[in-house]
Amino acid sequence: MAWLFLALVLALFVGVAIYVRERRADQREAEQAREAAFLLDVTGGVAADAGPPSARLAAGDDNVAEAVAPVPVAGAGRGYLDRSHAVVYRWLRTQLPDYEVFPRASLRRVAGRGRVGKDLMLDFALCNAALEVVAVVDLNGDAAGASVAAFKRDVLDEVGVKYALWDPRHLPDRQALIDWISA
């Protein structure tokens, strides 16, 4: 009789182990589906290796505004990035595949909390494979922002991070970008 009870308990443990394993596999599949949906949303509904926009960017087409798919607007809300920031983000991702591009970075996080009293927004932080910030890109703002840009440049120079202020309508060519970031 004891062996029958032991067999039932063992069968119960095996059943629970199989159930947990299947549930984890389902959760992993759901997470991968959410990640794929997010990546499609970030790329504007176009797979990274398909379609003319990414092919034109990879080929070095200088007309970035036409090469990038329109930024989708989900429902009545706004997208995470406005049009010019989305264009530059996709252009940076395409031109610098070995770097991570983080939009809307924080100066305090890049330079350190002790160096900056009031936090300022950075348009893009470019990181190497080890996720160390190597460069920062801001897009041109108004004329009053010149002193803010100079402050950001000084703080980032202190920590050894390159800083660039670009007009989103006139981006540097691919070779100039690679020379700047690797210098």
Image: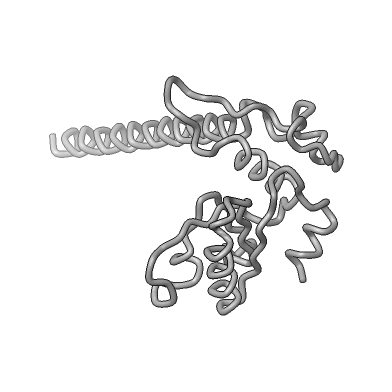
Q: How is the image coloured?
A: one colour
The tally of labels here is 0
Give the residue furthest to the bottom: 158
Q: Is residue 183 left or right of residue 45?
A: right
The answer to whether 73 is drawn above or below residue 148 in the figure is: above
- Image x and y of residue 132, in percent: 58, 67
Against 179, residue 49 (above or below) is: above
Answer left or right for 28 relative to 136: left
Residue 127, picture quadrant: bottom right
| Residue with the most extreme top position | 75
Check the image and report above or below for 2 versus 149.
Answer: above
Residue at 50%, 67% (x, y): give it: 110
Between 151 and 69, the one lying in front of the other is 151
User: Between 67 and 97, which is closer to the camera in this rendering?
Assistant: 67
x, y percent for residue 50: 75, 28
Question: In the orientation shown, which residue stands out farthest toward the left?
Answer: 1
Residue ID at (28%, 35%): 16
Residues 60 and 1: in front is: 60
Left or right? Give the position of 21 relative to 32. left
Q: Give coordinates of residue 85: x percent, y percent.
A: 60, 42
Q: Which image quarter holds the N terminus?
A: top left
Q: Residue at x 69, y 45 (%)?
A: 168
Image point 40% across, 34% down: which residue? 27
Look at the image and tell me in which quarter the C terminus lies: bottom right
Give coordinates of residue 87: x percent, y percent.
66, 39
